Amino acid sequence: MRPLSQDRSTQSTQSRTGRPVEHLGWAGAALAGAVVGHALTYLVAFVTPHSRQAALDETGHSYWNFAVATAIAIGAWSAIVLIVRHLRRTARHDRGDHAEEGLLRTAMRLAVLQVTLFACLEVGERLAAGAPLRGLLGHDLVPLGLVFQVLVALGLALILRALATAVEVVARALLEPPRIRALSSWPLPGAALQPSLLLLSGGWGARGPPSN
């Protein structure tokens, strides 16, 4: 049996090595969410496909189809990473700094990351394409972007929570040994149900010979 200090040291080492992977998972999920929120923002800001495509071309979005495909792949990888980390914490019963986060906290974390990524993408795209930054103020891009990033972050947090719960239920059903039900025993008959010793001895008592 390993000492308790060795177990704690092993858990601490696993926790330190797993943190960068978990951070990458959150960053990848936020990147996927930022791309989805970005697409929804332009879908609402520019109603017609012609005006939308023209706005994307003018602001350096020629790479957009590739960005969407990359975001889908990164989002799927990030979801797997975060779910695996959740299952490992649950298996270790680790309730310290790695306690299960609430839904609102997860959504807030994703929303902050997504808004930051959205702002960096918009500014970087316009600088690279030579488009004026004041274009962000037109067509309500900034308020629409903020709203959609928050909504997408909340939806993404719900999806991650639902996936983690479903995988956890399946894993427990597959890994936990089946429970053996105890055999039901019948109670022995009580004193009132036991036959009388007199009956077992052959009658109510000894009878004498009949008198002549």
Image (spheres, helix red, strand yellow):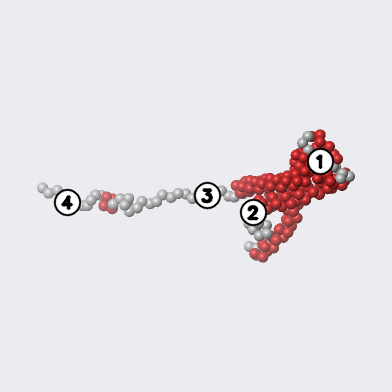
Secondary element at tag 2? helix
| Residue at the disc numbered 1 | 64
In the image, 106 versus 120, the foreground residue is 120
Whole-Å distance between the Cαs marked 4 and 1?
Answer: 116 Å
Looking at the image, tell me whether mark 3 or mark 2 is earlier in sequence order.
2
Measure the C-alpha gap from mark 2 to mark 1: 38 Å
Q: Position of residue 201 (x, y in %)?
A: 27, 51
Residue at mark 2: 90
Between the C-alphas of marks 3 and 4, the distance is 61 Å
Query: What x and y, as percent, mark residue 90?
Result: 64, 54
Q: Which residue is mark 4?
A: 208
Q: Nearer the viewer, mark 3 or mark 4?
A: 3
Residue farthest along the left direction in this orientation = 212
In front: 114, or 182?
A: 114
Q: CA distance from mark 3 to mark 2?
A: 24 Å
Gap in angstroms between the C-alphas marked 3 and 1: 57 Å
